[in-house]
Amino acid sequence: MAREVRCKTVEEPSRVALAKTHAATPSFKNKTASGSHLSNVHLCISSSCFLSGAGQDVGRSCILVSIGGKNIMLDCGMHMGFNDDRRFPDFSYITQQGRLTEFLDCVIISHFHLDHCGALPYMSEMVGYDGPIYMTHPTKAICPILLEDFRKITVDKKGETNFFTSQMIKDCMKKVVPLNLHQTVQVDDELEIKAYYAGHVLGAAMVQIKVGSESVVYTGDYNMTPDRHLGAAWIDKCRPDILISESTYATTIRDSKRCRERDFLKKVHETVERGGKVLIPVFALGRAQELCILLETFWERMNMKAPIYFSTGLTEKANHYYKLFITWTNQKIRKTFVQRNMFEFKHIKAFDRSYADNPGPMVVFATPGMLHAGQSLQIFKKWAGNEKNMIIMPGYCVQGTIGHKILNGQKKLEMENRQTISNGQSEIERCEPGCCCLSLEVKLQVEYMSFSAHADAKGIMQLIRMAEPRNMLLVHGEAKKMEFLKDKIEQEFTINCFMPANGETTTVITNPSVPVDISLNLLKREMALGGPLPDPKKPRTMHGTLIMKDNSLRLVSPEQALKELGLNEHQLRFTCRVQLQDPHSDPDTLSRIYTHLKSVLKGYTIQHLPDGTVMVESIVIKVSSSAEEPNTKVLLLSWSYQDEDLGSFLSTLLKKGLPSGLSSM
């Protein structure tokens, strides 16, 4: 049931090459067995039998790329909508048994969100991978904290087994190699990667993967619009063979950020003024800081008294990491950071679980952002029955989460009736005895206001103009929306755009260019022969000797090559036998051939020599016959490799025989 997605490229032989090259099709086999230079880009999205990967789906990003015989995993995420085996990618696609180390050259994580890194300890420690894992410095710092929070909710609170441990997270992070922006990292002798700023969240990066002249760019999640604390994504004009882009908001063109902020503040203000409570589900870092800065400024300006709370501990952690990685924020925050730290909030306090039952208005930022678990879901259960209250969903919610259900207008929810029990050291969620199902009526107001840090349709088109890819591949989006964007991209940019579902196969043909230096003497000789000057826009065949030395290619004249390499010249000639029926004597047959060639070949030097041969340029023609069959003539044609085309033409012409009535000289 699981299928694969592949993007492969077949290299066109270089026009200056003297020998043809054959490309093979790679597969995800043991990398030690497929280490040859395969001129292919082969891309696979890991999938299970159901929704997985990031193909026509948001969540569980895990993309496998094979380029030039190198196998790279891009992201290793979990799916927020599942609590069973479908939560993690199906790694059996890579290998049915054994560890993944033998099959992967490296793993690259684009950012710290769990749908991009949540399966990392499971993959490295439980399935088995010992190779390098690349991510930026902020991602390396924040990733283990979110993974540990995820583990606590899943194991300590819900009591699930067959899950990674705290030690596994630590062991996994020991394999991480940190990346700096715009730094080219040599993974091995042939594979190199380079990170670009992606916006989205602190430390998010787009990555260029390059082997030889072939390259792939993977965007991860990115934002082309700067916000209150991060800059806009940027990449140079790298012209990759394939640009793999997220498409979460493939059909959305957002209104101005100022309008959205004004509407958000108005709705919060109105709810608080009528005595209601506002719940804003967020992930720990990213939109949380954006909206905290916005509310902090508004509360200060309006002299508001209603309390604002943030999930315990996360404010301090966020503040620490934004201080540590201040260079990843936008220019305004970097400039004012010495005078005032924008992440030290006067009006926003740490939240305690007991505050949810307090009377009166309040605003609470709680994690996680999709209401699939944790504190945000617990608060939602308490506040959902009061129409005075409001929930504002500031980001995307994947299918299967409570957030997705209420945004689609669902007013009655069936969910597990779990009670939080404290044993003095930790908290455990367990079902109430005799009833494991809770029917919840949703009366509070539900608002969706997109403060999501994903690129919208306009931003995706902007990135394509920036990078100028030869082919486009859309992931991390919904099928219908991706179809619309795919058509728009193909129409506007006249490039192929693919949107594979999990497990499908896509083949992409590329024509990588191979740079070759041509010697000045060879160019002068071409000009002396009357040829036109080289035009970079028009292909042209040039004859010479190709020298490969010190990872560079040079095309020089044969004489120069012999001199540089200290070799002696050898004359190579080709000989061809042609049988001809002719009743004349051998000398007369040769004369008739001479006459025939003079009439057919205009502008060529043709000679009838005294030694009984005819010469056409460098081609020598001799005639012989046997005493037993005097009418059957055997013609011997001999030519140098420079006149190979003319020699082939003459042998074909003489095989047709001589015209009747042709006189000898």
Image (spheres, grey):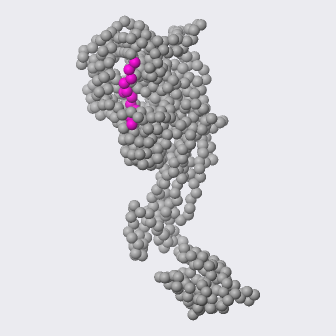
Magenta span main SS: loop
566 or 559, nearer to the observer: 559
How many numbered marks, from 0 up?
0
Magenta stretch encompasses residue 219: no
**Residue 627 at least partly seen:** yes
In the rendered image, residue 305, in percent from the top left (x then y), is placed at 28, 12
Q: Which residues are magenta?
A: 446-457
Q: Residue at x 48, y 14 (%)?
A: 412
Residue sitting farthest toward the front: 661
Q: Is 296 placed above or below 623 here?
A: above
Q: Is 625 placed above or below 82 here?
A: below
Image side of residue 195 versus residue 425, left or right:
left
103 or 382, nearer to the observer: 382
In the rendered image, residue 235, in percent from the top left (x then y), is placed at 38, 42
In the rendered image, residue 85, in percent from the top left (x then y), is placed at 59, 26
Q: Quadrant of the N terminus?
A: top right
Magenta stretch encompasses residue 454: yes
69 or 379, nearer to the observer: 379
Image side of residue 307 versus residue 281, left or right:
left
Q: Residue at x 32, y 17 (%)?
A: 268
Q: Residue at x 47, y 71 (%)?
A: 557
585 or 342, nearer to the observer: 585
In the rendered image, residue 10, in percent from the top left (x then y), is placed at 54, 53
Residue sitting farthest toward the right: 628
Q: Is 83 placed above or below 255 here?
A: above
Residue 540: which quarter of the image?
Answer: bottom left
Q: Quadrant of the C terminus?
A: bottom right
**Residue 145 at least partly seen:** no
Q: Residue at x 60, y 45 (%)?
A: 27
